[in-house]
Image: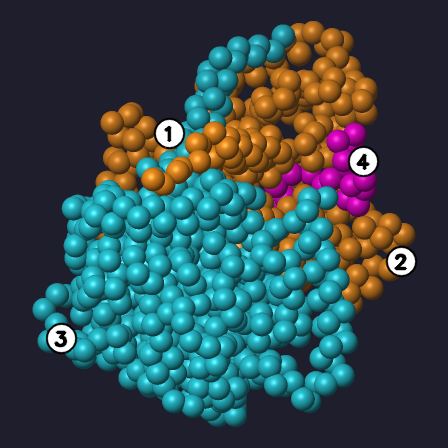
Chain colours: A cyan, B orange
Amino acid sequence: MKLSNIIKHLSYAVAFFCSTFCYSVSANADERPNIIVILADDLGYNDVGFTNSSTEIKTPRLNELAENGVTFENGYVTHPYCGPSRAGLLTGRYQARFGMENNVTYTPYDPYMGLPTEELTFAERLQKVGYKTSIFGKWHLGGAPKFQPNNQGFDYFYGFLDGGHMYMPGQVHVGSPDGYWLPIVRNSQPAEFNEYLTTALSRDAAQYIKRSGNEPFMMYLSYNAPHAPLQAPAETIKKYSHIKNKNRQIYAAMVDEMDQGIGMVVDALKEKGKYKNTLIFFLSDNGGLYPDSWWPQYDWADNAPFRHGKVALMEGGVHVPFIAHWPNKIKQGFKFDGLVSALDIAATSVALAKADASDGLLEGVNLEPYITKRKTGTPHKALFWRLEEADNIWAVRTMTGKYMQQGLPGVDRAYFDMVNDPTEQINAVDKYPQKQAELAKLWNEWNKNNKENILRQSNEYKSAVKAFYEQLNKEDNQQANARKKYHVN
Amino acid sequence: MKLSNIIKHLSYAVAFFCSTFCYSVSANADERPNIIVILADDLGYNDVGFTNSSTEIKTPRLNELAENGVTFENGYVTHPYCGPSRAGLLTGRYQARFGMENNVTYTPYDPYMGLPTEELTFAERLQKVGYKTSIFGKWHLGGAPKFQPNNQGFDYFYGFLDGGHMYMPGQVHVGSPDGYWLPIVRNSQPAEFNEYLTTALSRDAAQYIKRSGNEPFMMYLSYNAPHAPLQAPAETIKKYSHIKNKNRQIYAAMVDEMDQGIGMVVDALKEKGKYKNTLIFFLSDNGGLYPDSWWPQYDWADNAPFRHGKVALMEGGVHVPFIAHWPNKIKQGFKFDGLVSALDIAATSVALAKADASDGLLEGVNLEPYITKRKTGTPHKALFWRLEEADNIWAVRTMTGKYMQQGLPGVDRAYFDMVNDPTEQINAVDKYPQKQAELAKLWNEWNKNNKENILRQSNEYKSAVKAFYEQLNKEDNQQANARKKYHVN
């Protein structure tokens, strides 16, 4: 048995003990908060009201949460795109620790294509101490049964397994090879999908809250909005007809619908009397799309004041809108400028749930002391990024500086003074050799415990699968052609 | 453009002309019959009332159809198991003509794993001359979108794509790699599955009939019953508690439920006033399971008086319960002993529908003259079989003799006198060299136009897919391990 498995089994034992005894004796006095993690998909930094001085896209419900909560002004995800970012968020570990630096390709047949089951999601940790755990929306961490949410810590699943889905009711095809078209699922059963998907996910989440009992719950509301395909109800698009860019009109409507959906969830909390003791996190899984060379036509998101977007390690790719809201503990809204990571969501949740973290694997910081103002400063000394699937692409930032490498126009290897130039306008590479060396050292130390990436890119993966079937068919035909025609005597 | 494609396009043109003009001018006078093909799956020859002197399993509705219709006492399928047998039935061509001598494995990803789209199903032929075409139940001719029923001639599909399905309501799993567990589908949408599957299929077929308009329809009611898994409602199993073999109790209940379902369809025809002008065929896709060496535990079906069963080319594998029922044309039930093939269903249907068969590809015989007693004798001089995926396994029979080869206990190469020994008790190989030589010649002539099998067995296919993913993962890990750990300077 591998060490990680032993640890896993020990932690099960501890958790079983705890879930059986620790809370059953004091069920009525359970004051542990509910936790809701709302994740947007490819949302631009500047496309919500609370980060934006302009008011182009209407997000009144999110703005209200931000006003009464904590706005993390330096909130980051661990990867500039979907799958790895979600793996980091859900495990509370840098995904490079387990070699997952690429998107998972949806397939029910590949037992290697998913978040390794040896890794614990924080849903698994919370489940063991009596939390009801649920996911609504996008999974994107594996299609084979063992990788599906119900086997990775979630009691309840309403959503889809692939990295995205068509948004309009009826846009499904049971026999589709493309996960975007598969039926919406409730646990393993096909589920209703009779309205705009963002609304359907929100409605189901709100109903889940209304049905909830006395046990605390953890909810992962994983919108695919505003990820492509660009689809939104016509009447919502009309609200944004003043925007010139037609794509951005639809995109704005998608964000608007998400905000309305979040409103449904918040209203359900209020109705159920669970508003005050629910900690809500909201963030995006990465920056909005930016018309970089690899997708010049994707021009609808706005990551201002940051440069570039999804897939880039510049701020536009990893510095995301990020808030926390918890009326019981945050009496007055404020902005927080310490370095906060998506990893901290697992660490905070596990701490608040009094779940087991004795395996020492969690890499985030419990934010509770910061959001209750008992503690100031930065939760993280440094944050790290790595994209090993292409040429070496990496970044490290502290409160004062950022050192990175990525083949972007005018960037390549770069150093940015994050105090005076937080939007990365001036590449000061090699101008502060000492600071640069310190950052390099931090990164190298962090990197020591990483596993090299084992997931190939989706297009490469799909090409390999296609080539395999072609080869199989070719072999079968060759064999058929080579066979001597039988003659009956 | 290949010749077959040119033919296909020409036939489209002819059919378009015909569907547009031939019937639209005389829509009210359309006297072409509706056609229903009811296919059982792995049904034993002796497990319906109309072939059986005993009455162990109750099939009153089928018996009634047989009494008032034609019972084909020498009715055969073209293959002793599911996929190829269905390919023959639906195309009206020996499936060896297009190299399909094996079961199709369900996968939405393989664009080669299905009934070749160049082949025309007779549903496609009928669709072009104004028939409404529908399939209820098992497809088993390809999972990739281009192979699905809606793309192979069927307007309407309620059922499943794989070679079988779980029977009990709720036994589905959207993300399953196993087609037996996928949602029941209506065309491309997930569909209700709230009752015993055989009943659900029957109910939907009956409703389809009740909804039908003036156009004639062709319906393919493709039960998976009584194919494994052995599952039936408890109360129906109770009816058969006198049967000692527990497996056979369930199997009997599955046949019973199928008979009841057929009753629902017949009642719908009566209710709709379409009973008299509907030609119903009923047959099994192959013989019932027999506990041969390759599955000694499969002991629940009864192919008496014939020997062996599914997968064998002895009568037990290919000689099936087979009837036709058409009140308008068959005024009194009778038994017919000429050689009849599942291929004849397409030929008869195309002839009655006045559909296009000018490509000359259909190999069946129009049975209409025989079932209306205008013609006597045998529709086929000889019938042929071939299983090329293993060692050469073949058979040919005429009205008087059968010559075959298959590695079965005491059989191997065999000649049977079908006049005096129709149940193949005595292997008279090499005793009638002249007759044997005639049969060999017929088979060799028939075989000249066959294409060697290009579909590998499901277990081999699945092993290849598994090995591919293993190899892919191995390569990715090797590449990861070989990668030099990056050092930031």
Which residue type does callout 3 highlight?
A: Ser
As drawn, the label of residue B296 is 4
The residue drawn where x is 63% and y is 8% is: A489
Q: CA distance from mark 1 to mark 2?
A: 52 Å
Q: Secondary structure at mark 2?
A: loop
Drawn side of residue A155 relative to residue A175, left or right: right
Q: Nearer the viewer, residue A80 or B456?
A: A80
| Proximity of marks 3 and 2: CB atoms separated by less than 8 Å | no
Q: CA distance from mark 4 to mark 2?
A: 23 Å
The residue drawn where x is 29% and y is 25% is: B3
How far across and how far down the image is residue A8, in percent?
68, 55
Pair 3/2: label in front: 3
Whether marks 4 and 1 lie on the same chain: yes
Q: Secondary structure at mark 3?
A: loop
Comes first in the chain, label 1 or label 2 = 2
| Proximity of marks 4 and 1: CB atoms separated by less than 8 Å | no
Which residue type does callout 4 highlight?
A: Pro
Q: CA distance from mark 3 to mark 1?
A: 59 Å
Q: Which residue is mark 2?
A: B242
Q: Which residue is mark 1?
A: B360
Q: Which residue is mark 3?
A: A241
The chain identifier of the residue carrying mark 3 reads A
Q: Nearer the viewer, residue A376 or B71?
A: A376
Identify the image quadrant of the N terminus of chain B.
top left
Position above or below: A446 against B367 = below
| Proximity of marks 1 and 2: CB atoms separated by less than 8 Å | no
Which residue type does callout 1 highlight?
A: Gly
Position above or below: B420 against B432 = below
How far across and how far down the image is residue A289, in percent?
25, 58
Decide: few, some or many residues near mark 1? Use Cα within 10 Å; few <14, some 14-19, many ≥20: few
